[in-house]
Amino acid sequence: MSAPDTTDPLPSTDIDPRFHDRWFRHIPASDGDGWVLLVGVVHDHPSSLHRAAETVRRLEPSVLALELPQLGLPLFERHADRADSPPRYGGEMAAALSERGDSRVVGIDAPSRRFVRELADYVRAERPAWETVAGVLAGATPILRHALRYRVAAILDARTHLRLVPDVPTEFDVSAEDEAAAQAEDEYRQLSRSRSLLDAVELPPDVAQLDQLREATMAARLRSLRAEGSVVAILGQDHLDAVEKRVQET
């Protein structure tokens, strides 16, 4: 995998299997807008932490975009700025932040004003059943509540120097000390298992619609951020294709 529009390439798969092409989507620069590189992750996996951090370190993007609400950024920045390497808490988002340098950092996920606009546009255009709208709002409420917990935890962390962790990190069968090949193999196994489970069930319309609105929100934010230059975005792997397609929409 080579870095787009840069002279410092990312490792090839032969050198580091954690950089397989499956984890990347590249949207070239055009019409004065910078390129966008979507970097897929399995949340909290050591292979993903390495890929997120190393990609940001090597490419030094103008903007680092994260699948986080803007409200949540301060807590993850505090996790990133502690001495742990890789960060003990905050997963791949904190790992990417630890290498942010001069990059502007933006949380692109819901809740946000953009998400509210996307929801309003969806209701006006599709006129869905009230049950679907109510289900989307019910699903969005825990997301808002979680984002507020992030912000409160960051404030208390800063004022009391207590390390507050709203999310318990997921544990895997490999760690950052394992060989790159072992990490990559386990990460792909986790991804395949997750997709098999998702393929085996049919999501309720409100759950599926909430995911689509989140993806539309993130893509719209990325389209606007391209005007500032190059963008590296760290996202859950299952969002990559939908977000890529929406970013490329005019």
Image: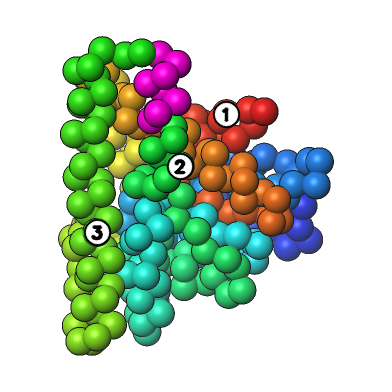
Q: Magenta segment, which residues?
A: 119-126
Q: Residue 163 location in percent, x, y?
A: 21, 78
Is the residue 2 above or below the residue 124 in the image?
below
Q: Residue 61 location in percent, x, y?
A: 64, 61
With 63 as the anchor, is 34 left or right in this view? Answer: right
**Location of residue 103 by image quarter:** bottom right
Residue topped by disc 1: 245
* Residues at marks 3 and 1, CA–CA distance in whole angstroms: 30 Å
Q: Nearer the viewer, mark 3 or mark 1?
A: 3
Residue in the image at 46% along x and 50% along y? 108
Q: Are marks 1 and 2 in contact (CB under 8 Å)?
A: no
Which callout, 1 or 2, points at the residue further toward the start of the chain? 2
Three-letter amino acid code at the position of disc 2 = Arg
- Secondary structure beneath disc 2? helix
Residue topped by disc 2: 114
**Location of residue 58 by image quarter:** bottom right
Which callout, 2 or 3, points at the residue further toward the start of the chain? 2
Three-letter amino acid code at the position of disc 3 = Leu
Q: Are marks 3 and 1 in contact (CB under 8 Å)?
A: no
Residue topped by disc 3: 148
Q: What is the magenta segment's predominant secondary structure?
A: helix
- Secondary structure beneath disc 3? helix
Rate crowding at label 1 as few (under 14), some (14 to 19) or many (20 or more) other CA atoms within 10 Å.
few
Residue in the image at 25% along x and 46% along y? 143
Is residue 244 at least partly visible in the picture? yes
Relative to the observer, which residue lies in front, 190 or 208? 208
Is residue 22 at least partly visible in the picture? no
With 173 as the anchor, is 4 left or right in this view? Answer: right
With 249 as the anchor, is 44 left or right in this view? Answer: left
With 153 as the anchor, is 81 left or right in this view? Answer: right
Is the residue 170 above or below the residue 131 in the image?
below
Q: Residue 18 location in percent, x, y?
A: 49, 52
